[in-house]
Amino acid sequence: MSHNSSNTILGILAGAAVGATLGILFAPDKGVNTRQRIVDETNAAKDKLANGAINLKERVVETVSAKKGTIEDRVENILSDVSYKTEDVITALEKKLGELKDKNRKLQKS
């Protein structure tokens, strides 16, 4: 999840909490009832934010874990390819060395 999506979600939740609080404050009701509703709405908003943060954290952890696995697989594949390429280079060098040794023997006999 991107940083902008996180900010959007938090903004929506904060806006909903502020809107609910303002709605309660301007509603015609007794002060005791209004204060209790504010406490209830604040607790509900706090719980929503906490749950949203937990869900966001879980998604981030899942995404990071998936990316980490992908990167590890890529590194392993690269190392495997390098190993095969190294063997090819060694084989080519050994072949060239053998050719040079043959030429050197021929030159020494002359």
Image: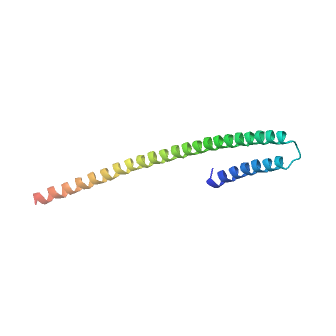
Query: At 34% across and 50% down in the image, what residue appears?
Result: 86
Say whether residue 74 is left or right of residue 9.
left
Q: Is residue 51 above or below residue 109?
A: above
Rendering quarter of residue 51: top right
Q: Position of residue 106 (x, y in %)?
A: 15, 58
- Residue occupying the far right of the picture: 28
Query: At 45% across and 47% down in the image, what residue appears?
Result: 75
Rendering quarter of residue 35: top right
- Residue occupying the far front of the picture: 31
Q: Is residue 25 above or below residue 33?
A: below
Query: At 57% across and 42% down in the image, what residue appears?
Result: 61
- Image quadrant for the C terminus? bottom left
Q: Position of residue 30 (x, y in %)?
A: 87, 42
Q: How is the image coloured?
A: rainbow
Name the one closer to the observer, 106 or 24.
24
Q: Position of residue 89 (x, y in %)?
A: 33, 53
Q: Position of residue 49 (x, y in %)?
A: 69, 43
Name the one closer to the observer, 70 or 94.
70
Say whether residue 88 is left or right of residue 60.
left
